[in-house]
Amino acid sequence: MPSATGSQTIGPFWHLIEHPEWADLTRFGAAGERITLTGSIVDGDGNPVTDAAVELWQADPPADEHFPAFGRSRTDERGEFRFTTVKPGPVPGHGNAQQAPHCAVALHARGLLKALVTRAYFAGEPLNETDPLLSSIEDPKRRATLIAQPQGADHWRIDIRLQRGPHAETETVFLDI
Amino acid sequence: MVETARDPVPFRPYDPGTQPPFDAPAYGSTHKRHPQESLVRLPHTITEITGPRFAAAQFPPIPDLSVVNGKPALGERIIVHGRITDEDGRAIPQTIVEIWQANASGRYQHPGDQHDAPLDPNFRGEGRVYTDDDGWYRFTSIKPGAYPWRNHDNAWRPNHIHLSFFGSGFAARLITQMYFPGDPLLELDPVFLSIPDEEARNRLICKFDIAVTAPEWALGYRFDVVLRGREATPMEG
């Protein structure tokens, strides 16, 4: 049997398939605690990545006809993305472990021949202390790249750095999945 | 970490050489965008093994890119079809395929594309179809033109169509490009050449298909796609 087909970059012109409403995961009438998740993406020089497709997926609340659990946002000229979604709850991990509430985040862009995958957790969640992924990352600065911070009511922010670059900035934790 | 029978069945690792690296020196845009730290391996959980489903009622199909408001686009009309399976040969039914491409002149309907080639008001360049119950998909379009890019001196992208697939879980997500047989630009293209394994690379080239070629209408091409398969179900030990 053949192996999985090879990935190629989404390129700079993927906006032909962009539908801005996809960034609002609540548009089909989802119930639950509505939040805004924003952030920026910068490259190794700290310059904004202005042509990325950011994709969000969450296993909780489960997808149904009112909640796609999936969204896509472009980054704008400042490298900023923005989602409206429902705040996820905990989901099972391996064995008896619980995972803290999180969203999966995939980045597609010119210069990325395949997706970069990370997660957005939420600051202040008690389960963050025992989450299997978070607790496996020893460097607190790196661990912090996975945790969105509150920006006022129902607004969370997570900034993403693709590369530590020449000044040894803290690179976002990307996942091998 | 204790594995239990109720743990989700993970996707298999990718076969070596079949996927491109993040750092591809010949492709300039990777220089400042590839991670320098090691990726953190994440055993698949419910987050990675589940994924979005798209219903045609909410995401309606766009099966013909070759017409806008009843007016035909310029260029060589083509029909692209193929079968989407997993690595075990099982069909992926009722899954969405997103499609986008340049027009016959090699120009995207996109403000960022400043290539000095004509836009075609009858070609927008977006499509969307779903596989049938046996994993087959099909769309109509026009053959995209080659276009210059500034990656290196006199750099031209080979003719290609961008395709996006979701499969059965978030970890099976695939975005790729379909190329055309006999294109002399392929051996010069750092994006195509980024896939190390030659056989895997060549599977990104579609095949001319006379059986799907529609007389007096359009040339047919076949492009099969394989999405990640699952590990064998763990044995109770």
Image (cartoon, coloured by chain):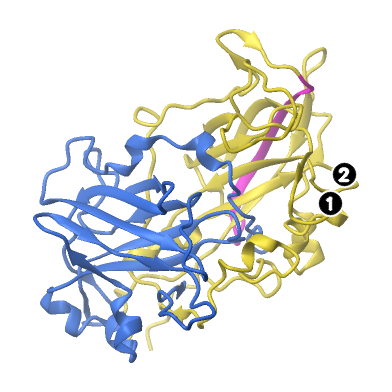
Tell me what residue is drawn at x 76 percent, y 54 percent. Answer: B203
Which amino acid type is marked by label 1? Leu
Residue B76 falls within the magenta-colored stretch: yes
Residue nearer the viewer, A86 or B114: B114
Which amino acid type is marked by label 2? Asp
Q: Is residue B69 left or right of residue A127?
A: right
Residue nearer the viewer, A97 or B68: B68
| Chain depicted in blue | A
Looking at the image, the residue that sits furthest to the top is B70
Magenta-highlighted residues: B75-89
Residue A19 falls within the magenta-colored stretch: no
Helix, strand or loop for disc 1? helix
CA–CA distance in space, label 2 to label 1 = 6 Å
**Residue ID for mark 1:** B186
| Chain depicted in yellow | B
Tell me what residue is drawn at x 74 percent, y 39 percent. Answer: B222
What chain letter is assigned to the residue under label 2? B
Work out which quarter of the rendered image holds the N terminus of chain B and state it: bottom left
